[in-house]
Image: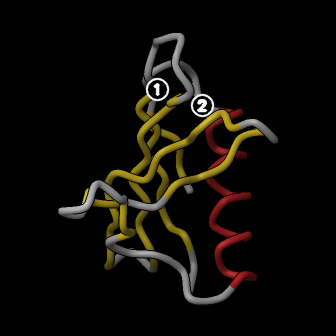
Amino acid sequence: MDITDIRIKRVESDNKLKAYVTVTFDGCFVVHNLKIIAGEFGRFVAMPSRRTRDGEFKDIAHPITTEFRQMVQERILEAFDKAPQDEHSPG
């Protein structure tokens, strides 16, 4: 499975959220609302999630394997680093 498009929407604020991301796979499947977060141990990509009734967040969509999660995160962070402010970054 290839990432064929990555769109970065930077968030200008002082909090940990740095950007929202939309990723297209194989030109035919899109996932919206991934987030780039500046965490305690560096940046990471959070998958789209919803708050449950008990207040926890649960991923709506996520990679099954560690290897695929790492590949997706690496590609997204590379695109974030290369993307101008509020611009589209090809995958």
Estimate the spatial distance between the alpha carbons at disc 1 and disc 2, rounded to whole Å.
9 Å
User: Horizontal placement of 29 versus 89: left or right?
Assistant: left
Residue 81 vs residue 56, the one in the foreground:
56
- Work out which quarter of the rendered image holds the C terminus and state it: bottom right
Residue 16 in the image: state x and y as whole percent.
Answer: 56, 27
Give the colouring mode of the picture. Answer: secondary structure
Judge whether 7 appears above or below 28 on screen: above
Q: Which residue is mark 2?
A: 83
Q: Which quadrant holds residue 82?
A: top right
Residue drawn at (46%, 13%) of the image: 12
Q: Which quadrant holds residue 73?
A: bottom right
User: Horizontal placement of 67 versus 51: left or right?
Assistant: right
- Work out which quarter of the rendered image holds the N terminus and state it: bottom right
Circle 1: residue type: Arg
Residue 2 in the image: state x and y as whole percent.
Answer: 57, 78
Which mark identifies residue 10? 1
Q: Which quadrant holds residue 84?
A: top right
Label 2 crowd bin: few (<14), some (14–19), many (20+), radius 10 Å? some
Residue 11 in the image: state x and y as whole percent.
Answer: 43, 22
Indicate the secondary structure of the residue bearing disc 2.
loop
**In the rendered picture of this protein, how many numbered marks are placed on residues?**
2
- Residues at discs 1 and 2 in contact (Cβ within 8 Å): yes
User: Horizontal placement of 77 versus 31: left or right?
Assistant: right
Indicate the secondary structure of the residue bearing disc 1.
strand
User: Horizontal placement of 48 versus 55: left or right?
Assistant: right
Residue 70 in the image: state x and y as whole percent.
Answer: 73, 69
Circle 2: residue type: Ala
Residue 49 vs residue 2, the one in the foreground:
49
Residue 91 vs residue 52, the one in the foreground:
52
Residue drawn at (65%, 88%) of the image: 65
Give the residue at the far left of this rendering.
Answer: 53
